[in-house]
Amino acid sequence: MKIVSDKTADLQRRSEKAKAMGGPERLEAQKKAGKLTARERLDLLLDEDSFQELDLLRQTRAKEFGLADKDLPADGVVTGMGRIHGRNVCVYSQDFTVMGGSLGLAHAEKICKIMDLALESGVPVIGLCDSGGARIQEGVDALGGYAEIFYRNVQASGAIPQISAILGPCAGGAVYSPAITDFVFMVKDTSHMFITGPEVIRAATGEETDFDTLGGVEAHSERSGVCHFVANSEPDCFRQIQELLEFLPQNYAEPVKPRVTADDPNRESAALDRIAHQDAKRPYAAHEVIRELADERSFFEVHAGFARNIVIGFIRLGGKSVGVVANNPAHLSGALDIAASEKAARFVRCCDAFNIPLLTLVDVPGYWPGVEQEHGGIIRKGAKLLYAYCQATVPKVTVVLKKAYGGAYDVMSSKHVRGDLNFAWPCAEIAVMGPQGAVSILFAREIRRAAKPEERRKELVDDYTKQFANPYLAAQRGYIDEVIEARKTRGKIVNAFRFLRGKKAAKSPKKHGNIPL
Ligand code: HXC
């Protein structure tokens, strides 16, 4: 028989009250808004019965502006420890039904406590955000609370994976915590992120906009690049978070758990041969190549809607997690521009921080030309990708599939920026520029003066193609370690990563570099 003492009953009463969140009316409003509650979300994200809550009974000490009379269960945020597929994680889940999930000092301290615990224990931290931002009544304490979280986000950066899911509003300076974390998820229709809302924008600039246009999923997954993953629903979001975690380690010092695979490491691919022989005017999507190379042809793409001229994401090779960066000829001919450079640079740094090896698939005609790009800062922002590759010390394997022209050849994990093993397909073209452009510059006068200018141009283009548009000059100089048949690529790269597993990188005693941010 279960004996319940008065004291136990008192604890149960207090706990139940705190767990009732904002009460039936506000819970109903949450449901009507198409959102789950803070606690339902944790139930779906975490392994069954694995959640251990901390600070359930925490309360604000603020009394100003009517707060003294308010009851704020758990101070509007559920925090604790749990497991995802058996792995320890720390989580916080903001409760919009308690004062709009607004962040006061106690709320912030609860999040900070869980972040400290995550960093000290070396486990990922996942934040489920649904909040009206700084609790206005708590003034500077709320602002200070946010800053304490930002500070911890930065300390934890590169040490433990940090994941944010935006499941409602995320406004004002509050957006900077997710922005610092490694991966941001948003859910269609219910997630919004912005620094200043539509009304402030209207007052300040006269621009007319609304929440969705300004800070909805489309804005951030396709235009701003703030959002890495779009989910169709909250359950879909949690499923994606679970899948992402499978590619990441618990922390920078631990390896990613390998997955047993029955896929033959030396599986040959006729599809890759077909892509290699396909006319350059019929562009292929980088995803096709990535899937052919990956274990079970499975590719977990990151940032799918943003800067589609470069494709990034995770695959497994021989069971091991590998980050992939691939130019995508199906969009803007795979050229590098500002958005692509920033997208890939952050991913390279993320993989390097967590010791995830990098596979780079090169098919790049160069940098995307234009006044907008130049004035937008392609020099400074394009340099980020160069910097990221130069700095990355994880095993780096590169395959030049087709074009590798100009500065983009250098940047895309070439031997010169310390690619460890660099391969090329026989159809690769590694040169300063393409045949047409080169001939126009080198032989403009000769072509003009020729009796039959177009015939002469064609002769010169053929000659240049024979001499320069191939992988063999680079192979003769050792910049390409091996020219490989397209169909055999998987076997070559699986073996290359297997060999590089023991790679040790020298550490510099300097404080840090000065990346062109
Ligand atoms: C205190 C807040 C609050 C806040 C919402 N509430 N935001 N209370 N501080 N920041 C309360 C509301 O008063 C309301 O209480 C309840 O939460 C639900 O809010 P509603 O407005 O009824 O909900 P909804 O219509 O869905 O609108 C949600 C919203 C809106 C769009 C988020 O509440 C809103 O615009 N809030 C303010 C957003 C904002 O500007 N925050 C400050 C950002 S600046 P009752 O009791 O009526 O139910 C910032 C600085 C951070 O955060 C700086 C860090 C450096």
Image: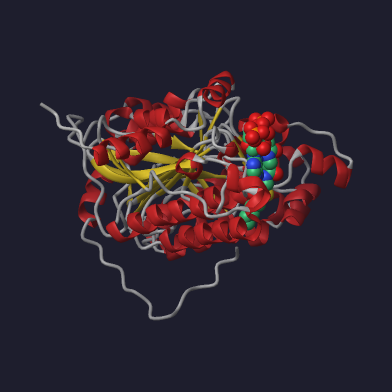
Q: Is residue 75 visible?
A: yes
Judge by depth and name the residue closer to the eye, 229 or 153: 153
Q: Nearer the viewer, residue 298 or 490?
A: 298
Q: Is residue 306 above or below residue 423?
A: above
The residue at the point 35 percent across, 34 percent down is: 13
Residue at 36%, 61% in the rendered image: 478
Residue 187 vertical position relative to residue 341 in the rendered view, above or below: above
Q: Which residue is drawn at the image coordinates 39% and 42% (left, top)?
A: 425
The image quadrant where one finds the C terminus is: bottom right
Q: Is residue 336 visible?
A: no
Please state which of residues 322 and 161 is positioned toward the viewer in this rendering.
Answer: 161
- The structure residue drawn at horizontal position 33% and vertical position 26%, both measured from the top left corner, is 270
Quick one: quadrant of the N terminus?
top left
Q: Viewed as shown, does residue 211 lie left or right of 11? A: right
Residue 355, position as x, y percentages in the image:
32, 56
Q: Is residue 453 left or right of residue 471?
A: right
Q: Position of residue 151 (x, y in %)?
A: 50, 63
Q: Is residue 154 left or right of residue 248?
A: right
Q: Quadrant of residue 85?
A: top left
Q: Residue 305: where, in percent of width, then height?
A: 57, 33
Which residue ends up furthest to the left in the rendered image?
Answer: 1
From the viewer's side, name the closer residue of 330 and 83: 83
Where residue 212 appears, x then y in whole percent? 69, 30
Rendered view: 439 above or below 128? below
The colour scheme used to paint the residues is secondary structure
* Quadrant of picture, ligand 1: top right
Instruction: State left or right for residue 66 relative to residue 285.
Output: right
